[in-house]
Amino acid sequence: MEKLSKRKLEKIEELFRNPPMGSKTAAAQDFGVDLSLLFRWLKLSPQERIEEARSRMFFLEEVRRQGELARSKKS
């Protein structure tokens, strides 16, 4: 799969910036969904999304590991 076309991204960006009243996009925004973060992810290709998620997962695993190490030194 490829990235979304520039034209599609422009349409989505406009929808996210000005969601029609009563739409599911407006409901999501009213509920507190950060549409700008969703849009950021949509600008990436599926492969880029996987790589980004993998990078974040490795970072969080390291944070967890360092936290466990620090707690074990206190004991």
Image (cartoon, rainbow, N blue to C red):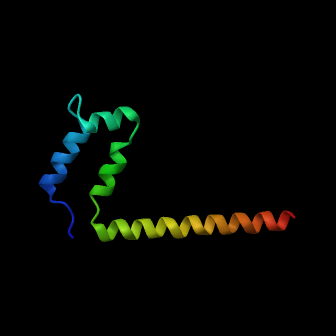
Q: Where is residue 61 shown, x and y percent of the image?
A: 59, 68
Question: Residue reaching furthest left?
Answer: 7
Q: In which quarter of the image is residue 19?
A: top left
* Left or right: 48 in relation to 22: right
Residue at 41 percent of width and 36 percent of height: 32
Residue at 53 percent of width and 70 percent of height: 58
Question: Residue reaching furthest right?
Answer: 75
Question: Residue reaching furthest top?
Answer: 21
Residue at 83 percent of width and 67 percent of height: 73
Q: Where is residue 45 shown, x and y percent of the image?
A: 27, 66
Does residue 23 lie above or below 48 as drawn?
above
Residue at 67 percent of width and 69 percent of height: 65
Q: Where is residue 10 shown, x and y percent of the image?
A: 17, 48
Instruction: State the quadrant of the N terminus.
Output: bottom left
Q: In which quarter of the image is residue 66?
A: bottom right
Does residue 67 lie above or below 22 as drawn?
below
Does residue 18 lie above or below 48 as drawn?
above
